[in-house]
Every structure is written in C-alpha cells, then in structure tokens.
Amino acid sequence: MEAGVDSIKRLFESLKSIGFFGRLFGWSGIRAQLMEAVADLQRLLSKSAEADKTENALLLERAASKNLNESITRLTADNAALKEQNKKIEELQKNLTTTEEQNRIYLKRGTELSNEVAVLRERIERIDRENQRLAEEGTKLQKDEEYRKQEHAKAIASLQNIQARIQTDRNAELEERKNTEIKRILKLKETWNTHQENVKNTIKTICARHTVEYVEKVPFKGEPDNTLKISQEFIIFDAKSPAGEDLSNFKQYLKNQAESAKKYAKEPDVKKDIFLVVPTNTLESLDQFVFRLADYNVFVISVDSLEPVILSLQKIEEYEFAEQLSPEERENICRVLGKFVHLSKRRIQIDGFFTRQFFELVYRSEADLPKDILEKVAEFEKAEKINPPIERRAKQISNKELEQETSLLKSEAKARGIETEDGLLSSRLNKLPLYSTDPYPEKKEDQTDLFH
C-alpha cells in the first residue's frame, strides 16, 4: 500500500516542480509516472475492500484519488495546451526554416550584389582614373592648341606680309609686262600701218639703185601695190600685213590673197610669179611660203628679202633664152608642144565620144530595164562611191608610177580578153578625123565606132 502511495506522491512532486521546458521536452517521463501512479491507484482500488479496516486509510485513499483525478484533469488540460504550443512551435520552426532559407537566398544575393558592387566600384575607379588622364591630356591639348593658334596666327600674319609683298611685286611685274606689251603692240601696229609705204619706198630705192623700171600706173585692170617691169613682163609685189595683233588668222588671210591674185595672173604680159611682201616679224607665225596654184605661183617674202629677189629677177633680162637656141632646138620644142596639143585635142575628142555613149547607156537602162530591177539598181547606185586620186600641189606626179599602173591595167585587161595593143588602137583612132567640115556637127548622127 505504501509503494503505490509513494508512486503517487512522486507524481505529485514531479507535477509541482515541472516547468515549461520540462513539459515541452520531459513529458514522456511524466507520462510514465502517471501510468505507474494510475496502475498503483487501480491496485489500491482493487484492494479497497480489504482496506476497510481503518477509516482513516480509506479517507486518505479517497483524498488521494480525488487529488489524483484533479491532477489528471489538470495534466490533461496542460497536455492539450502543450499540444497547441507544439503546433505553434512547429509552425514557428517551419517559419524559421523558411526564414533561414530566405536568409540564405538573401545572403547569396547579397554576396552577388557585393561582388557586383566591388566590380562596379573597380570599374568606376578605372573610369575615374581614365577621366583624370583624359582631363590631363585635354588640358595639355588645350595648351598645345592655344600655342598652335598663336603660332598659326603668327604664320598667317607673316604669310600675309609675304603675300602682300609678292602681290605688290607681281602687280609691278604685270604692270611692267603690260606696258612692254602695249609698247610692242603699238610698235607692231605702227610697223604694220606703215608697212605698205615702207615696202613701196624700199622697192623704189632698190629699183633706183639697180636701174630697174618701177611702174607707177599699170596698163591692165587692177591696182597692185608695186609693179616692176623686167624683160617686158610686169612683176607684182603686193604688201600684206595683219589687221591687228592676233596672227592666228594671218596664214588663212595670205592664202585667200594668193587665190585672189588670179586677177593679175590672167592679165597678158604679167609674170605668173606673184610676190606677197609681209613684215619680217610675222614670218614666225607662218608655215607656208609658196602657194602653187593652177596657172600661177604666189611667193610670201619679207621686206628684208626684196633686194635679192629683185636682183634674181633682173637676171632674166640679161639672159635672152629664145635668141640663144639653135634651129634644131627650136624645132624640137615646137614638135613637143605640137604633140602635147594634138594629144590633148584627141583626148577631148575621145572623152566626148565615150560621154555620149555613157549617156546613151544610162537612158537605155532607164527605158529598157524592168521597174523593180531599175529600183534595185538605183539603190546600189546610191550606195556606190568613187574616190579618184586627190591631186596634191606639193606632190609631183611620177612617170614611173604612171607606167607601172598602165602596165598593171594592160595585164588585167589581157587576162579578161580585152584588146589593148597600141598599134591596133592607134590605127583605128587615126582614122577618126580631128576636125569636122560639117557646119552643124551636133545635128549629124554619130556613126563612128572606135573598135568596130
């Protein structure tokens, strides 16, 4: 009986002395004591019948049971409160775990941000150093720029002074050149304006010195500037000078004057060599001094060459060519000239014959050919172009070249069966009369055939 009571007493003592952490963490021991006390109490109750021996023991038992029930009730309530507190503690632990996880995340992010801040701080420091370096360089460059501007201003001022001196010297040089050119042009104009009179006076002086006849009034049409008479021929010396200081057209002007000198060359007793006298200072602008025209020649000479030219022409008067020829030489000259005249007339006669034949062929082609063929022929006619050799005055026609061309044409004609024997052709041509006794030869029908 005492052992059961002792267990109950120990339970009460434990319940009285138990604290918050004892309830929280030592509840298993209390529960074991409670179970032991309940077991002892049941044993005590089961043996209550036997314990009726004394009333005091029963009362004690009842009091103990009552106290025990009250303790159990109180412990049950404490147990329920402890469960609630355990739930709160579990929630707090969960919150604590969540908070710790968030703290770890925040700590990790804080570490990352701290690293980024360190990198940014280092970059900022580097940028600050670069800015400082650039600022120092900018300051240096600004100083250099100011120095350069000062030097540039000094150089510009010096250059302007030099330019002003050069411009002054240049203006003076140009003014001097201008005055020199003006003087030269005035002198040229004066020379050219007096050129005609100067040429006339020079020629008269030469004629007076060498007893050459100077003709004041020519017996033919026209008024040349100067005319000399040597060996019964009139020799013309025309003075020509530029109209202004521009010599670019002077060459063409002389060419036109040479062609217009034909009015003198066609006059009887006028020598076919005509001279144009130009100022000496214009010779450098010319590249042609001889104009060989069809019936006469024109020579461009200067004032300085007048005397030797006139003296050379005077030699003709001293040489009587015709009187020094023998009768045989005279006969040979007349024979050659007669042959030339005869051949020229025969050529005119033959060319006229072939011209009539060609005209007849053209008319017959227009009359006899079909219209479509005639139109096609007209197209080919328009497309054809004949370019005969151009006659150049400065180039002499070579007899050797003519003989080679004639020989080549004869060979080609012979290869095509065309008769070109000189003897046969000449015998037929000689039968053709050179002159006609018919007073109206144009009305007579041409019945002559050179080859039949």
Image (cartoon, helix red, strand yellow):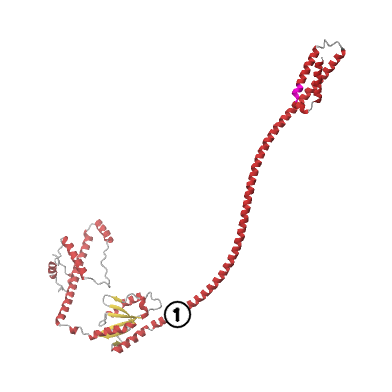
Instruction: Note whether 230 is above or below 115 in the view shown.
Output: below
- Please name the predominant secondary structure of the magenta segment in the image: helix
Q: How many marks?
A: 1
Instruction: Note whether 70 is above or below 46 in the view shown.
Output: below
The reply to whether the magenta stretch includes residue 29 is: yes
Q: Dot 1 corresponds to which residue?
A: 180
What is the span of residues highlighted in magenta in the rendered image? 26-31
Task: Name which residue lies at 27% across and 83% down.
Answer: 312
Instruction: Note whether 91 is above or below 283 in the view shown.
Output: above
Instruction: Look at the image and tell me in which quarter the C terminus lies.
Output: bottom left
> Within the image, what quadrant is residue 417 found in?
bottom left
Q: Amino acid at mark 1?
A: Thr
**Side (left or right) of 162 relative to 301:** right
Front residue of this view, candidates 229 and 372: 229
Task: Name which residue lies at 81% across and 18% down.
Answer: 6
Say if residue 21 shows up in the picture: yes
x, y (%) of residue 322? 19, 83
> Within the image, what quadrant is residue 79 found in?
top right
The reply to whether the magenta stretch includes residue 208 is: no
Task: Name which residue lies at 80% across and 13% down.
Answer: 45
Say if residue 279 shows up in the picture: no
**Side (left or right) of 189 relative to 323:** right
Instruction: Look at the image and tell me in which quarter the N terminus lies.
Output: top right
Q: Secondary structure at mark 1?
A: helix
Instruction: Note whether 428 is above or below 374 in the view shown.
Output: below
x, y (%) of residue 205? 32, 88
x, y (%) of residue 134? 61, 56
CA neighbours of label 1 inside 10 A, class few (<14), some (14 to 19), many (20+): few
Task: Name which residue lies at 58% across and 68% down.
Answer: 153
